[in-house]
Amino acid sequence: MFGGFFNKLKEGLTKTKDNFTEKITDMLSGAMTIDDDLYEELEEILITADIGVETTLDIIDRLKIKIREKKIKDPSLVTGCLKEVIVEMLGTEGGSIKPERTPEVILVIGVNGVGKTTSIGKISSKLKGDGYKVLMAAADTFRAAAIDQLEVWSNRSGVDIIRHQEGSDPAAVVFDAVQAAKARKVDVLICDTAGRLHNKKNLMDELGKINRVIDREYGDAHRETLLVLDATTGQNAVQQAKQFMEVCPIDGIVLTKLDGTAKGGIVISIKHTLNIPVKLIGVGEGIDDLQEFNPRDFADALF
């Protein structure tokens, strides 16, 4: 099973590898010495892989120290050092959606189009497969078709859904979902919430109201907020995350569409800039293609 997962990850990172690892290998194979020009070229490759300027400069600084410490003179050995630096930056903390304790409420936020509803469907399916009793709440009530889309995923994953009419109060949906979760002895309640980031005040009020309902009606439940980001948007995803962080605390990132982009370096940038764990990564369209993030596997697949 693990081999299958790793191969999927490797496949999913093909575009990033072409844009990143192969360019580095080509550049190093032509280099005679490790000098400022080499570091400058490397910097350029990292920035174009959407690792971001701030993170790139930190990587280069750490790389220089490592190369000095190991007294490396051969340019072909730089790749190994670079991989070590990236592994250190990503840390050892792997992603998991296994509930810390049950009952648990997962609030899922993210702007329209990032794959939020799809991710909820896949998370529900994953948790159900692990033996948890799951319930979905369709509390993104303002986006046309969001409720219907979640219903499709509820059928696909065999998980019940609580829904109201489009345009209804999201907090009222969550209220009903909490009552249902308690009555049905559900382990995990997953709430699809709105992501209208252009009006932070509204979003803040809405999430505040939802959280007050959960505090009052389901105070003993463990709570987690996941932010869904689209890897294909590169550094924009980091900016989005910063804006959401102003509105509410975020416990983990779900990074979708890694297979569709050459900007997979964004994973490193998110960890370095925001210091929020990447919990899940999407490497395909299938219901099983949302994987728990493992930093070491990510680096191995990248190199």
Image: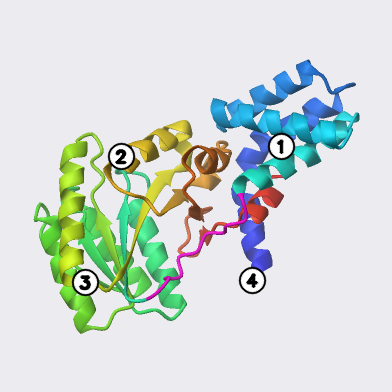
Quadrant housing residue 262: top right
For label 2, the residue is 246
Amino acid type, label 2? Glu
Q: Which residues, given as a range, are shown in magenta? A: 91-101
Q: Where residue 8 sits in the image (x, y, percent)?
A: 61, 57
For label 1, the residue is 21
Depicted 256 relative to depicted 69: above or below: below
Disc 2 from disc 4: Cα separation: 39 Å
Disc 4 from disc 3: Cα separation: 37 Å
Residue 100 lies in the magenta-colored region:
yes
Are the two marked residues, 4 and 3, in contact with CB atoms closer than 8 angstroms?
no
| Colour basis | rainbow
Amino acid type, label 1? Thr
Disc 1 from disc 3: Cα separation: 48 Å
Residue in the picture at 26% in, 38% down: 197
- In this view, the mark in front (2 or 4): 2
- In this view, the mark in front (4 or 3): 3
Depicted 139 relative to depicted 48: above or below: below
Amino acid type, label 3? Tyr
Q: Where residue 230 sits in the image (x, y, percent)?
A: 43, 43
Q: Residues within 10 Å of mark 4 (few under 14, many from 20)?
A: few
Element carrying mark 2: helix
For label 3, the residue is 218
Residue in the picture at 50% in, 51% down: 278
Element carrying mark 1: helix
Q: Residues within 10 Å of mark 2 (few under 14, many from 20)?
A: few
Are the two marked residues, 3 and 2, in contact with CB atoms closer than 8 angstroms?
no
